[in-house]
């Protein structure tokens, strides 16, 4: 048994808090769910610390707890209600299709630290992880992203090395071609996007897009695919008045923008860049603006 007060425990685990939060976000795709899983992890670690026998490092032990809390959340049928749009009685917006996007996806605010720069949290990667079975996502993140040896991962998951190796192989095959890291956008692209958006310049905006660009708007299960569909969407948006953008970043350096209609916040857009062009746009609800230290309303 070991004696440690709450303050000493907090100091002990503080160096791992941020990376554990990022780990939970990767596995769950939702900032809210990641925060809940992190708090459950820290509570479980505090409650069970007296029994920690140091057969592994403290970091490995904490990851073991966090991973299993996330697996429990992933397996919970009640975690996110099904949002089925089969078209029956539903009129989709022009140019939109009913998509299979992860409707609980949320953006992750950036911070300037070494961990964020070296570990991937790109929207494309995190979204792709949500399509894997729970055990496969745990194995892939622990092995390929965090670099834990197969034997340690097997111990964390209560599995054999052979089953871990098999799960990793299947996960890699399913995620083949998904880039784990966001491509740097460059200041020029950001400036052109802001100018085109704020000036309601459809042609200027379309010129920045890849031919197969797609736009999603979680929690709505809608997709706009291709330049024409995305252009039609923004034509309707711009017709209702000009917007102002406030530049920020999300998910490991992806360009992001608080969107304001008049003075009121109307959402957050995160861009994915491929080959110097915008290959994906994800629009989130205005409720996420405070996470990025952006106001709900701009000052007059």
Image (cartoon, helix red, strand yellow):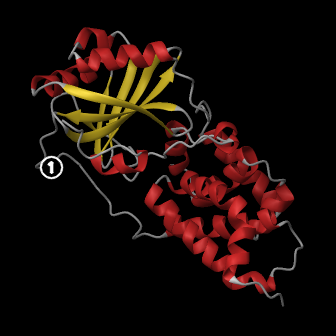
Q: Is residue 96 above or below residue 295?
A: above
Residue drawn at 60 percent across, 39 percent down = 175
Q: Position of residue 38 (x, y in %)?
A: 57, 66
Residue drawn at 79 percent across, 48 percent down = 147
Q: Position of residue 10 (x, y in %)?
A: 68, 72
**Whether residue 209 can be seen here:** no
Q: Position of residue 113 (x, y in %)?
A: 65, 42
Residue drawn at 64 percent across, 69 percent down = 68
Q: Is residue 205 above or below residue 88?
A: above
Crowd tier of the residue under label 1, counting other residues whose Cα lies within 10 Å: few below 14, some 14–19, many 20 or above: few
Residue drawn at 59 percent across, 70 percent down = 69
Q: Is residue 281 above or below residue 298?
A: above
Q: Which one is nearer the viewer's eye here, 156 or 163?
A: 156
16 relative to 129 in the view: left or right: right
Placement of the N terminus among the 4 image quadrants: bottom right
258 relative to 262 in the view: left or right: right
Secondary structure found at label 1: loop
Placement of the C terminus among the 4 image quadrants: top left
Q: Is residue 219 above or below residue 229?
A: below
160 relative to 195 in the view: left or right: right
Query: Residue 278 occupies which quadrant of the picture?
Result: top left
Q: How many marks?
A: 1
In this figure, which residue is indicated by the disc labeled 1?
88
Q: Which one is nearer the viewer's eye here, 195 or 29?
A: 195
Q: Which one is nearer the viewer's eye here, 139 or 288?
A: 288
**Whether residue 195 can be seen here:** yes
Q: Position of residue 251 (x, y in %)?
A: 52, 40
């Amino acid at each position: 048994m070991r004696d440690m007060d709450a303050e000493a425990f907090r100091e002990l685990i503080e160096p791992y808090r941020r990376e554990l939060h990022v780990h939970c976000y990767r596995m769950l795709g939702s900032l809210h769910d990641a925060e809940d899983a992190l708090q459950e992890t820290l509570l479980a670690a505090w409650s069970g610390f007296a029994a920690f026998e140091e057969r592994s490092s403290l970091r490995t032990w904490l990851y073991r707890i966090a991973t299993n809390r996330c697996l429990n959340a992933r397996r919970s049928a009640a975690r996110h209600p099904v949002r089925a749009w089969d078209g029956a009685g539903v009129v989709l917006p022009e140019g939109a299709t009913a998509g299979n996007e992860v409707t609980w996806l949320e953006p992750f605010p950036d911070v300037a630290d070494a961990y964020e720069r070296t570990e991937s949290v790109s929207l494309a990667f995190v979204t792709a992880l949500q399509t894997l079975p729970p055990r496969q996502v745990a194995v892939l993140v622990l092995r390929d992203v965090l670099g834990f040896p197969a034997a340690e991962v097997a111990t964390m998951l209560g599995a054999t090395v052979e089953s871990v190796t098999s799960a990793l192989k299947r996960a890699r095959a399913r995620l083949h071609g998904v880039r784990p890291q966001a491509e740097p956008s460059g200041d020029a692209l950001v400036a052109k996007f802001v100018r085109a958006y704020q000036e309601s310049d459809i042609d200027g905006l379309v010129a920045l897009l890849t031919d197969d660009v797609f736009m999603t708007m979680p929690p709505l299960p809608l997709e706009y695919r291709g330049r024409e569909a995305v252009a039609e969407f923004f034509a309707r948006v711009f017709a209702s008045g000009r917007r102002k953008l406030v530049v920020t970043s999300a998910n490991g350096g992806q360009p992001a923008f608080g969107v304001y209609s008049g003075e009121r916040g109307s959402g957050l857009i995160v861009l994915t860049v491929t080959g110097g062009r915008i290959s994906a746009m994800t629009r989130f609800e205005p409720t996420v603006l405070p996470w990025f230290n952006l106001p709900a309303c701009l000052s007059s």
